[in-house]
Image (spheres, grey):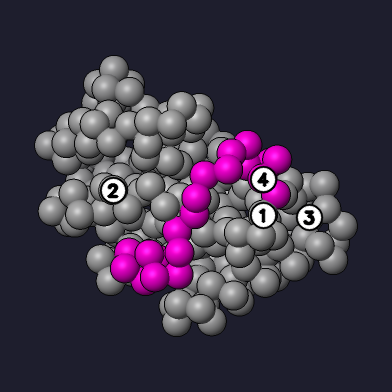
Amino acid sequence: MITLRRFLYMCIGLIHRITAVKSGIYVLCYHSISEKGWRFSNSKKEFLKHISFIHRNFSFLSAEEFVKRLTSEKKVKKPEFLLTFDDGYKDILTIAKELETYSIQPVVFLLGEEEVLNRREMDNKLELLSEEDVKKLISYGWTIGSHSLTHSQLTKLSQKDLEKECAQSRHDLEKKYGVTVTLFAYPKGVYSKKVINAVKKAGYSYAFSMDDDLITFRTHPLLSLIHI
């Protein structure tokens, strides 16, 4: 199976371009769905145009289906997508119902409690999902992943702080929501061998980076996915 990753901070023109790419699996990541002017925000109207186009031309995968694809040697015969959201901003609730009508079940990578976040690294002060908000998304079939505890750049941390960022975020999410957390997204896609080892030690099975390349089922699972 070939999984093709693309760095898609998307517009409709880019979607048209990828229709000529070979069949494979793509991971699309969004952050905020709003018109507040943050550089990583998409308006609801723009976002729904993207989803409508992709829905007509490609197949969406849940996190469970996505993992099955990665662990199978069967060839992917059509373009397939996993939809993800970074950081867990409250404004993604505005499109949750629309995604449910498309039977799309995204992954949302959550951070720690709001008071511990590294807002300088995040580059915004946007409101995050509440505990009740997250539970609502889980009821819609969304998958919860970890995006570290504070969104600090993991490669700059001491070994002790690095392990805390990876392990405590997983522990806290599992305890709070009663789910198993196996997916991790490196903040800003930055990682090193030491970071990979900490993610592995914390018990994650798959990690998302910003690397843009062809991968196969043989690719290292903690480097094999694109986080946009």
Left/right placement of residue 142 relative to residue 213 reads: left
Measured along the vertical axis of the image, is residue 126 above or below residue 130? above
Mark 4 burial class by Cα count in 10 Å: few <14, some 14-19, many 20+: some
Measured along the vertical axis of the image, is residue 85 above or below residue 69? above
* Cα separation between marks 3 and 1: 22 Å
Question: Measuring 58% from the left and 67% from the top, which residue is drawn there?
Answer: 204
Which residue lies under the disc numbered 3?
Answer: 194
Question: Measuring 33% from the left and 32% from the top, which residue is drawn there?
Answer: 43
* Cα separation between marks 4 and 2: 23 Å
Task: Specify the label residue 94 is tagged with.
Answer: 2
Which residue lies under the disc numbered 1?
Answer: 117
Q: Are marks 1 and 4 in contact (CB under 8 Å)?
A: yes
Mark 1 burial class by Cα count in 10 Å: few <14, some 14-19, many 20+: some
Tell which of 76 and 132 is nearer to you.
132
Rendering coords of residue 140 (x, y %): 25, 66
The type of residue carrying mark 4 is: Arg
The type of residue carrying mark 2 is: Thr
* Cα separation between marks 2 and 3: 38 Å
What span is in magenta? 118-137
Say which label, 1 or 2, has the lower sequence index: 2
Residue 144 picture quarter: bottom left
Say which label, 2 or 3, has the lower sequence index: 2
Rendering coords of residue 99 (x, y %): 22, 51
Say which label, 4 or 2, has the lower sequence index: 2
